[in-house]
Image (tube, helix red, strand yellow):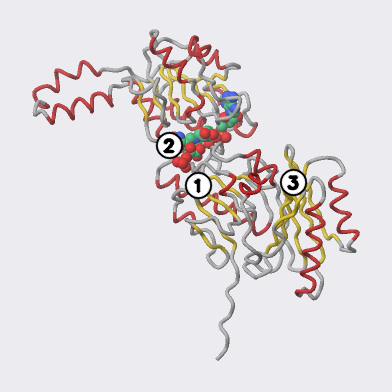
């Protein structure tokens, strides 16, 4: 009887949070294995809001994709140091968040929540029909048309929100000190007013909607100073991140005459809850079927493309890198290194010294990260003997001072020799070998603990 064919090892994708199944189905099952419950051997991670720990990231992991926009739940600087790109899915959930931010505008301007709660009580006590026309006077509101919305952050979500606000006949002011040219060109510039400071936006707005990322520049941006510039009855909508608002300052503002509402998609601290003018939702912004599928599909495609070809798109820490197709006759070596003078020469000399011909070489960079993709001529007999020498070559490359990680891409996808992985961690080289082979390696967290 013929021996059963050995199953080809697969690239392992570890998921955290429930990732949309239709999105995950973009991974070709003949090449990828999805693991929901353990990190063993993961080459890539897909996650939503899970707060990623270094211990969640196995040493073989070469890609982290956030199915969504905000990457503040991943330690991006640490991943950059370790040579691991972090991807996100720009715009994939923007419509979902826009719709909920519009809902936030209505919740802020009309007594929807309080009125509905009161009606529930009245139904329970059997008084609903008798009382309805009497109680409504307690829950009156104001209209949005003619009021001014201040939008902070004019990216995918901010732009969608402001366009919808214009359709509601609101005036719009916007603030975004980091606006990209692409994003600026998509704005209806003649219909909105862009201001140069958050103070100016605060002075002009009846509603302020936050759509900036959470980082060291934006956390606490709604501060005592900004609150002091706001109109007394101005409302704040926060569908970005809780950290953007200084909650103690906002509580003080409410305790000292601020009569607007705060509608937010994130849990708040005891200063703000419970208060009748604070409406908190359980991080629902991106939780629609459509957004979940869009984000998961985009993250899956970006991850598969990077693992299979080295191409980088939508990374928050690595340079966008468009690569020509790899010919069957070449082996692709991807090197992540510190972006400093001399590195490229040192990397190329490893190949020169080994007498290996470089077919093409592409170098890109972003911040501290240099990314080199080097296609080299393959030996005509690419057997186990040569593989050992490729391992040695990868060891040399990875050992270079300033190299963060290296990876081989070769063979046909899902064959045993599809990709080799190595990482340089504090001068030591770990993880040489092909996909699916080698001993179980530690996680970055375990190495950090040792260091
Ligand atoms: N509630 C939820 O479920 C969701 C929340 N979000 C949050 O919304 C944020 C924005 O998402 P997108 O619009 O998709 O991202 P984006 O990257 O398209 O837009 C963010 C914009 O904020 C701007 N910005 C940066 N620093 C700023 C500052 N100091 N002041 C004002 N603007 C600043 C950027 O220049 C950019 O134009 C995400 O970072 C995330 O934290 C995103 C999706 C879902
Ligand atoms: O995309 C984002 O930044 C979000 O906040 C959405 O988070 P979620 O995917 O719903 O956990």
- Which quadrant of the figure shows ligand 1? top right
Residue labelled 2 has its Cβ within 8 Å of some atom of ligand 1: yes
Q: Earlier in the sequence, mark 3 or mark 1?
A: 1
- Residue 46 visible: yes
The residue at the point 41 percent across, 36 percent down is 283
| Res. 81 image quadrant | top right
Crowding near the residue tagged with mark 1, few <14, some 14–19, many ≥20 C-alpha atoms within 10 Å: many
Q: Are marks 3 and 2 in contact (CB under 8 Å)?
A: no
Please say if 40 is above or below 191. below
Q: Which residue is mark 3?
A: 426
Horizontal relation, residue 74 to residue 399: left or right: left
Q: Which residue is mark 1?
A: 295
Q: Which residue is mark 2?
A: 285
Q: Are marks 3 and 1 in contact (CB under 8 Å)?
A: no
Q: Nearer the viewer, residue 111 or 186?
A: 111
Q: Nearer the viewer, residue 284 or 41?
A: 41
Q: Nearer the viewer, residue 271 or 363?
A: 271
């Amino acid at each position: 009887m013929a021996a059963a064919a050995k199953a080809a090892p697969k690239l392992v994708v570890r998921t955290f949070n429930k990732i949309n199944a239709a999105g995950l189905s973009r991974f070709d099952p003949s090449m990828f294995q999805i693991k929901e419950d353990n990190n063993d051997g993961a080459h890539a991670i897909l996650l939503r809001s899970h707060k990623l720990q270094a211990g969640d990231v196995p040493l073989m992991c070469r890609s982290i994709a956030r199915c969504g926009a905000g990457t503040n739940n991943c330690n991006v600087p640490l991943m950059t140091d370790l040579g691991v790109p972090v991807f996100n899915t720009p715009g994939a959930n923007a419509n979902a968040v826009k719709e909920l931010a519009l809902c936030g505008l209505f919740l802020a301007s009309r007594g929807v929540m309080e009125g509905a709660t009161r009606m529930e009580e009245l139904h329970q006590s059997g008084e609903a029909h008798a009382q309805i026309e009497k109680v409504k006077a307690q829950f009156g509101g104001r209209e949005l048309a003619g009021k001014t919305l201040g939008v902070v952050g004019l990216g995918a979500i901010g732009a969608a929100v402001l366009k919808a606000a214009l359709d509601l006949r609101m005036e719009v002011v916007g603030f975004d000190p980091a606006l990209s040219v692409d994003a600026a060109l998509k704005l209806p510039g003649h219909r909105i007013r862009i201001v140069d400071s958050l103070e100016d936006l605060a002075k002009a707005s009846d509603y302020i909607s936050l759509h900036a990322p959470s980082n060291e520049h934006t956390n606490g941006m709604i501060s005592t100073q900004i609150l002091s510039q706001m109109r007394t009855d101005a409302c704040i909508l926060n569908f970005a991140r809780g950290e953007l608002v200084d909650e103690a300052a906002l509580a003080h503002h409410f305790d000292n005459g601020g009569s607007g509402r705060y509608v937010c998609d994130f849990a708040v601290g005891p200063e703000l809850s419970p208060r009748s003018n604070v409406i908190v939702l359980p991080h629902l912004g991106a939780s629609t079927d459509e957004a979940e599928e869009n984000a998961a599909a985009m993250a899956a495609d970006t991850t598969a493309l990077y693992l299979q070809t080295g191409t980088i798109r939508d990374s928050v820490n690595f340079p966008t890198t468009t690569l020509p197709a790899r010919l069957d006759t070449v082996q692709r070596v991807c090197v992540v290194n510190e972006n400093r003078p001399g590195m490229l020469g040192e990397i190329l000399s490893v190949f020169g010294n080994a007498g290996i011909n470089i077919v093409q070489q592409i170098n890109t960079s972003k911040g501290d990260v240099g990314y080199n993709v080097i296609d080299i001529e393959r030996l005509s007999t690419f057997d186990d003997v040569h593989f050992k020498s490729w391992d040695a070559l990868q060891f040399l490359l990875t050992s270079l001072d300033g190299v963060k990680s290296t990876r081989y891409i070769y063979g046909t996808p899902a064959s045993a020799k599809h990709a080799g992985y190595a990482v340089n961690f504090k001068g030591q080289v770990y993880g040489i070998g092909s996909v699916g082979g080698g001993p179980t390696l530690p996680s970055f967290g375990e190495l950090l603990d040792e260091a």
